[in-house]
Amino acid sequence: MKGFSFGHLPGLLRTLAMLSMTLLGHSAMAQTDILPLVRAQCAVCHGERGESAHPEFPQLAGQHAVYLRKQLQDFQSGARSHEAMNSIARSLSAAQVQQLADHFARQLAQPQAADDELLVQLGRYIYERGNLYNQVPACKSCHSSTGVGNERMPRLAGQHPRYIETQLRRFQSRQRHNDSGAMAFVTQGLSELELRGVSAYVATLDPVVRPAATRRKTP
């Protein structure tokens, strides 16, 4: 902070203020240092800020850092299979994996526009209530009512619907093996219509957690 002096502050406050400024400086430096790697390895498919323009590639912006780190580690070990991602992940050090996860988690994501409102409403029903007749549990029981998930459960809100569809089909057909325990069971009862509906619905959810008074309402 240009022109600011710590001299007038009491000793303890001065120490805390200087420590805070130092940590902020290190944080800004870390964000700058990771950008060349982001541009070289990630930006072509996912965008520099994790806002992928291609519906087949996931939005990484705002995804939980712990979840992103685990996915990169699974790509490294082969627990999750994707030819390009396996190769890229194996070229990363543990420190780079953490830096990339932190970088994308800091970015702000945006909800997707709905193409078919009726399909979205069908998806909302399945997401919030499930389908008792086909033994499909409500998606919100794990991924939260807002779709933001948690460190173990990915943020679905604002994700590309086509990417969600692809992953649900991979769980359904047992082609995706990591994180597949519950998802393999959940997706077995999903019809193609329900699968597309859920994917369309979560895409419209606001990925940014806001106070209740300002949160965007889904019709």
Image: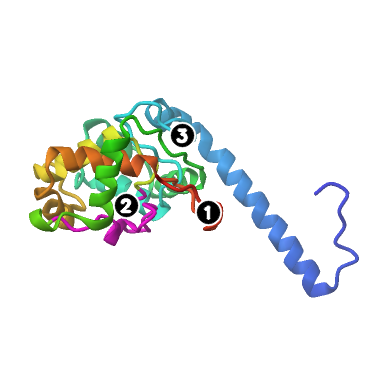
Side of 149 where 184 appears, left or right:
left
Of pointers 2 and 1, the one earlier in the residue sequence: 2
Q: Nearer the viewer, residue 32 or 162?
A: 162
Of pointers 2 and 3, the one earlier in the residue sequence: 3
Q: How would you classify the magenta stretch by its main secondary structure?
A: loop
Q: Name the residue under label 1.
A: 210
- The disc placed on residue 51 is none
Residue 150 falls within the magenta-colored stretch: yes
- The disc placed on residue 38 is 3
Q: Name the residue under label 2.
A: 70
Residue 98 falls within the magenta-colored stretch: no
Rounded to the nearest angstrom, the CA distance separating label 2 from label 1 is 26 Å
Please provide the residue range marked out in magenta.
Answer: 136-155
Q: Residue at x 80, y 67 (%)?
A: 14
Q: Is mark 3 on a helix, strand or loop?
A: helix
Q: What residue type is labelled 3?
A: Val
Rounded to the nearest angstrom, the CA distance separating label 1 from label 3 is 28 Å
Q: Can residue 75 be seen in this view?
A: no
Dot 2 crowding, Cα within 10 Å, few <14, some 14–19, many 20+: some
Side of 73 where 192 appears, left or right:
left
Q: Which residue is drawn at 29% across and 43% down?
A: 121
Q: What element carries label 2?
A: helix
Q: Where is residue 217 in the image (x, y as percent from the top left)?
A: 45, 48
Tags 2 and 3 in contact by the CB under 8 Å rule?
no
Q: Nearer the viewer, residue 119 or 88?
A: 119
Q: Which amino acid does label 1 sit on?
A: Arg
